[in-house]
Image (tube, rainbow, N blue to C red):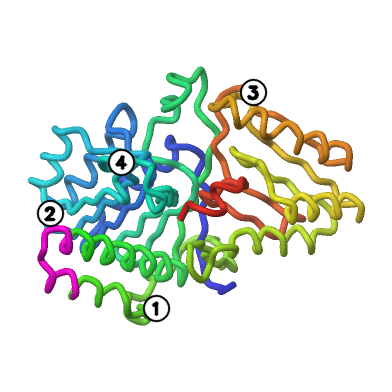
Amino acid sequence: MRSGHGLRLLEGGEELFPALVRAMDRARQLVHLETYIFEFANSALQVAQALERAALRGVTVRLVVDGIGTPGLPTEWAQRLTRAGVQWRVYAPLGKFGLLIPSRWRRLHRKLCVVDGVLGFCGGINIIDDKDDVALGRLPEPRLDFSLQVSGPLVADMLETMEQLWWRLQAVRSARQREFRAAWLALREALPQLRPEDWPELPPRGGKEKAALAALVLRDNVHHRHDIERAYLKAIGEARREIVVANAYFIPGRRLRRALVLATQRGVRVRLLLQGKYEHFLQYHAARPVYHRLLAAGVEIHEYAPSALHAKVAVVDGRWATVGSTNLDPLSLLLAR
């Protein structure tokens, strides 16, 4: 944890997209966006238009989308963004053999944006209209989801991890085109650890915004496979009064289930807000046995009925909170960035 952060909670695309657009329209040097889903329709179009405007002004604009969440950009928008100068890449496109190749099971599930190295956005919200849903169709009410607008030292951490992925993608692209020297140069760019002092200092913040403690917790398939789960376990293990978790895909492993049960035994009130509208038949039936065991231990479970729940957030004792893009199910904790 480091201090000196300004944090603003954003609910849904209704709040996130205008904040992204304002930041992109003020960008002078760099806009870097990663997302699982980018749907070029309805309210999400304003983000695409802001990317285009920034690139036309001469700002370096980079966009990375996931190969399953966004298999490809619509032809019109692919051409528009390319003409404007937006550099865009698809992470792990499925290709000819799809998911038959195990390495393609690993997905880019995070939603990050950094503008000029001083303002960041992170959380669970994809670039898709709040009432549009890939699996459920048009929703009756906006889905429940959250992101954070961040200023402070954390933004350098966000940009570092995004830059490293970008240059790895560049290396793979160059290698496939047999541009081996370009691939080597791109790979070299991905290797060094960027330092916070390499990026512009944060301008003074006005108003009554408090300087918050914050950390960026990421997972990968090498050194940080369990970092997000460990962060949850630590916070739950230290809880004394109340734990509130809202998570879209909640099929926790043994350690997380045990931590929640032990918390109830210590007298902690544990409340879970989970999906009431299921996208997948198997998800519904896999979750039921877990629910029964937790309910028997005294955990309160509520299902969100008004619309889809896509949030991945938690609050412990009103003092610790997380806003992220990681679901608490084995697949996400094993394979998703």
**Alpha carbon of mark 4 to alpha carbon of mark 1: how far?**
41 Å
Disc 1 secondary structure class: helix
How far apart marks 1 and 2 lie (CA) works out to 26 Å
The disc label shown at residue 97, or none = 4
Classify 10 Å Cα crowding around label 2: few (below 14), some (14-19), many (20 and above): some
* Identity, as a three-letter code, of the amino acid under mark 1: Pro
Badge 2 vs badge 3, beta-carbon distance below 8 Å: no
Which is nearer the eye, 79 or 227?
227
Q: Is residue 277 above or below residue 206?
A: above
Residue span colored magenta: 174-184
Going from N to C along the chain, the mark reached first, 1 or 2, is 2
Magenta stretch: includes residue 176: yes
Residue pointed to by mark 3: 305
**Residue at image location 55% in from the left, 47% down from the top:** 331
Residue occupied by mark 1: 196
Disc 2 to disc 3, C-alpha distance:
44 Å
Q: Main secondary structure of the magenta part?
A: helix
